[in-house]
Image: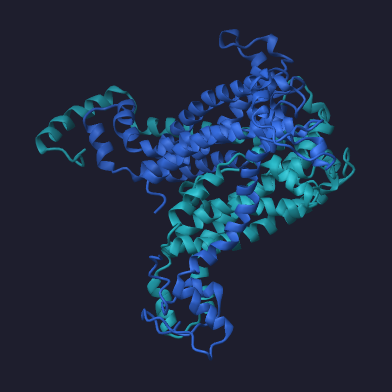
Amino acid sequence: MVTSEHSRPGNPSPAGAMSQGRGPGGDNAGRPRPVPPAPGYTFRQRAAIWIRRRGAGPYLLLLPATAVIGVLILWPAVQVGLFSFKNYGLMQISGVLPAQWVGFSNYSQILHDPEFWQSLKTSVYFAVVVVPLTMIAGTLAGLLLARLGPRMRTFVSVSALLAWATPAVSASVIFVWLVSPDGGVVDWALAKLPSWLGGGAHWAGFSWTNATLPAYTVLTVMLVWTGFPFIAVTVLAGLRTLPSELLEAARVDGAGPWRTFWRVTFPLLRPVFLVLALLSTIWDFGMFTQAYIVTGGLGQPDEFNLGLYEYSQAFTQPPHYGLASAAAFVLTIILLIVTVGYVRAAIKQGSLA
Amino acid sequence: MTAAPLTTASASARASAAPGRRRGRGLSRGTRRALLNLAGVLVALFALFPVLWMISTAFKPATEIYSLTPHPIPLHPTLANFRAVFSGSVIGISYWNFLKNSLFVTLVAVAASSLIGLLAAIALGRFRFRFRTTYLIMLLIVQLLPQQALVVSLFIDFRKVNLLDSLVGLIAVYTAFALPVTIWMLRNFAATVPKDLEEAAAIDGAGVWTRFWRILLPLVSPGLVSTSVFAFIFAYNEFVFALTFLGTDTAKFTLPLYVQYFYGQNSTDWGAIMASSTLFTIPVLAFFLLTQRRLASGLVAGAVKG
């Protein structure tokens, strides 16, 4: 049943450390002889023997984590699925009326809601634009880092990671200020830019956050800014695992950097790039905080992405928890499909070992 | 030139062609280095600019903030914006209150997730058992579930058990959501503690507690440091749960919620908004700078983001 050689009786194992005091047989290491619980043992000793003999150690160690994750993540996930088939709203949460099963009516309601499709489209377009941009920016930065001297490399990568570590709320508020029509530096700079670069006086006082396209342009720059450092340092770490002879050989063969990247680096680091692309997709498709702040809370339904649409169903008055759960379920399923790809890539990479 | 694993003949033939190509690009070693460094500085500037601009704005008087030509460095630096934040202008509650809330929630959640995560990591890193792989896959998936989806369900549950407008509820959620990454990263550290070491100690008569405190814990503590930093950054920065659970009680707000609320109430006073944002951001960035050396490996090892 249990294949752990750690959990044999008599073998010192951390399981013992966590579950009891010094058990009988705990000190004569390596003897796989089961010790019968003689009548003279205390309760603690009996428990220790039972745990070791049954190999229950790892399960006991996992118990607290499983309970916390189960109650606060897994159960809510299941409950979202259940709520999506119920008419849960204001009356139900305040206990005036009992919640009833309504079949697929929540789903058919959101699927007939043009706002749902609009928000889904926004999420998809956003991910389709931001993921490649972040990947390209991050990969270029990673390749650059690999060519820098050690000091410069530390300086650049730490600076970049500060962007990554900046809280989403701060980043959002900062970017709203940067693009503010009233004193923002972006409009000022664009107005100064020569017209052949797209600049001009018409940028002065341009409002970025009141329409979908400009708002999501700001969000695009922000998420590339937040996301590229992680990709850069991961690509850098990947580059260091490559055998230097291969890159040298490519150079000797006269391959330029472009060719070397696509013929040598990329194929060898394909699993790393796959994982990064999938993770970026999950983060960018599921973006919430930044969109919430930049588009101004829940006040502008035409600027919703899927996350905001779902959230607003539950948390604008009157609340529709059933509809929100149906939308949340759709969001979760889409992300789970990407996650399955991610898990498969992770398994291939051997990170489950 | 000679490191290529090719046959000698072709290697030498190609090697002779290569220098010509190099010179053809027309860049000396020094120029190349200078250009690369310049590119590096530009990348660093791009990354730092928003944060630097935030800090600079926080020190500017209103006349400079709305001037027609923005200066990167305040000409007449002032602390007025910070004073407004500390004295609790607009909201009526000082920054310190929110810092206290944030630190309380974050530190308790980090401690809880470290402890619970370490136990689970020992199980996953040092034992082979039946559902080990299943459990690891579960952690990978759970870590990527969208929080704004689960928050609906958690809101309804928390309402029933009176955990809304409560920092305790927030601590519970942050502990749970920090756990998958904590376990995932710690398990590798737990796996690297040599079995022989523990067995030797056992033969010398060290009890299980001694072995845990003296051998296992010191050896996994570098791992605990990096997972704690990640849990700290996650909990300190978290917004969706705080927004949903602490909706009405301003005094209970954590810092991210405070900054967002301050911005919402105050949307034209950019000096004060940037001051509040600076006071929220600088601690976590400073903390990150202090610990980043230890983080580099962990960051790459696990898929982590708030």
In the image, A131 versus A58, the foreground residue is A58
Where B168 falls versus A58 (above or below)?
above
x, y percentage for residue A28?
Answer: 40, 84
Residue closest to the far bottom: A40
Q: Residue at x 68, y 29 (%)?
A: A106
Q: Residue at x 75, y 41 (%)?
A: B244
Task: Give residue A209's position: percent from left, percent from top.
Answer: 71, 21
Q: Residue A315: x percent and y percent?
A: 76, 34
Q: Position of residue B205 (x, y in %)?
A: 46, 85
Residue A242 relative to residue B266: left or right: left
Q: Is residue B76 left or right of residue A149?
A: right
Nearest the viewer among B279 and A266 is A266
Question: Chain A rendered in what hue?
Answer: blue
Taking the spot 59% from the left edge, 21% from the top edge, the residue there is A121
Q: Is residue B72 visible?
A: no
Colour logic: by chain
Q: Is residue A206 above or below residue A267?
A: above
Relative to the observer, which residue lies in front, A136 or A64?
Answer: A64
Quarter of the picture holding the C terminus of chain A: bottom left
Left/right placement of residue A27 relative to residue A290 reads: left
Q: Which chain is cyan?
A: B
